[in-house]
Image (spheres, rainbow, N blue to C red):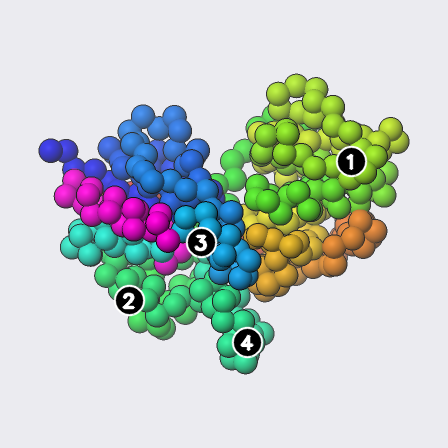
Amino acid sequence: MAFVLLVVSNGHAEDAIAARIVALVNHPTLALPVMGKGGPYEGLAQVERLEPRWAPPSGGFPFASAKNLIADINAGLLTIVPRQIRTMQRVRSRVRAVLAVGDAYALFLGWLGSARGQKPLFHLQPLISAHYLEKRSWFDRIRHLNELGAEDFLWFERALQKSAKKVYVRDRLTEIRAQNLGISQAVFYGSFAMDMLGPPERPLNCQKPVIALLPGTRADASFSLPIMIQAASLLPEFEAVVAWALPWEKVRLPAGFSLHIERQDRAIATNGTASVSLQKGAFSAILHIARVAIGTAGTANEQAAGLGIPVVAFPTPGPQYTRAFAERQKRLLGNALHLVEAGPRTVAEAAKRLAQSSQVRESAGRAARERFWPSGALPRIACELKEVL
C-alpha cells in the first residue's frame, strides 16, 4: 500500500494555499476540502478529493452571528461533522503525514487523520493574527465571545497544535505570541497571502488611474458590488476595474446599470454615462496597476495592502465582511486599510482622497513591509513536508 499525504483545508483561500503546496510537494495526496467543491485542487493529477464536501450558507462563518449558525444547522451542520470525522478515521491507515490548512476544526480533522498525532501533523494557520488583539481590552473580548476563535488561538486549538510537528503562522508577531503560549513549534516563514499572488495575468490597457474593486467571492458581494459601482460612477477621473471570480449571473448591479458580457473573461457594467469593467482571471493584473482599492474581501484586501495599495473598506450584512470582521482586519492591516460606512458617496470620497495622497500611499507601504514580508513561505513548507514523505 502506497502511503499518502492527507490535506484538510477549510475554505476557498485555504484550498488555494493547500493546492499550491500539494503541487510543490508532488506526492500522492488525499484532500478533504471541508467546504465547497475544492476547486483549487482541480487539475492536480496526484490529488484524490474526499467526501463529504459541503457549502454552508454562512460561507464558513457560523459563529459570526446567530443567524449564520441557525442557517448552517438547518443546512445539515450537525450531520456533516460526523460524516467528515468518519472519513478521517477511514483513511488514516493510508496516511504518511497530514497538513491541516485553516482553523481549529481543520486541525481537529487533521489530528484524527494523523491517528491522533501518531503520524507527522503540520498545521498552517492563515486566519489568526496577534495584530487582531491590538487595542482590544479583555472587556471587549469577553463582550464579543463569538469572535474569540477568530482573533486568538483557543485552548483546544493550542492543545492540538502541541501535537503538531510544525505550526505555520501568518506574521512575526503571531509567532512570538504562539511561542509565549507554549506552542514552541510555531514558526513564521513569510506571508501566505503574498505567496498566492502571482504575476499579472494579462495586460489591461487602462487609460486612466485605476481603482480596483474587490467585492470578494462570498455572498457579501451582492451587497457590496452595487455600492462599489455607484461609488466608481462618482469618480470619472478614474477607471474602475472589478476583480470578479463568480459566474456572471451572480453579478448584482445598482439601479439603472446593465451588464454587457463582451467575452468569457470580461464584461462591462454601464448606465449610459458611467461604465465599470469586470474582469475574470486578472486579479493580479488589476492589483499591479491599481492606485487604490475598494474591498470587502479577506485575502484580496490583504494582498492589495501587501503591495502597498491603500484599501477603502466598509462593513456588509455578512456572512463574512461584517463590522466585527472589518474592524479586525483594520487592526491587522493598520494604516493600509481605511474603514468607512457603507454608502456610495462616502466610499467615493475616501477613495479619491487616498488616491491623491502620496503620504497615505507611503504609510500603506510601510504597513505592508512590516506585516506582509517576506514571501516564500509555501516553498519552504513544501520542502519540510517532502522530508517526512
- The answer to the question of whether label 1 and label 4 lie on touching residues, with beta carbons closer than 8 A, is no
The residue to which callout 1 is attached is: 239
Q: Secondary structure at mark 1?
A: strand
Q: Which residues are magenta?
A: 78-104
Q: How busy is the neighbourhood of tag 1: few (under 14 within 10 Å), some, or many (20 plus)?
A: many
Q: Position of residue 356 (x, y in %)?
A: 80, 50
The residue to which callout 2 is attached is: 159
Q: Answer with mark 1 or mark 3, whichever residue precedes in sequence.
A: 3
Q: Tell me what residue is drawn at x 74 percent, y 55 percent.
A: 342
Q: Position of residue 83 (x, y in %)?
A: 29, 46
Q: Secondary structure at mark 2?
A: helix
Residue furthest right in the image: 273
Q: Answer with mark 1 or mark 4, whichever residue precedes in sequence.
A: 4
How far apart are the alpha carbons under marks 1 and 3?
Answer: 43 Å
Check residue 94 for magenta coloring: yes
Q: Secondary structure at mark 3?
A: helix
Q: Amino acid at mark 1?
A: Glu
The residue to which callout 4 is attached is: 143
Q: Answer with mark 3 or mark 4, whichever residue precedes in sequence.
A: 3
Check residue 43 for magenta coloring: no
- The answer to the question of whether label 1 and label 2 lie on touching residues, with beta carbons closer than 8 A, is no
**Where residue 73 is drawn, which disc sits there?**
3
The quarter of the image holding the N terminus is: top left
How far apart are the alpha carbons under marks 1 and 2?
Answer: 50 Å
Q: Position of residue 137 (x, y in %)?
A: 55, 79
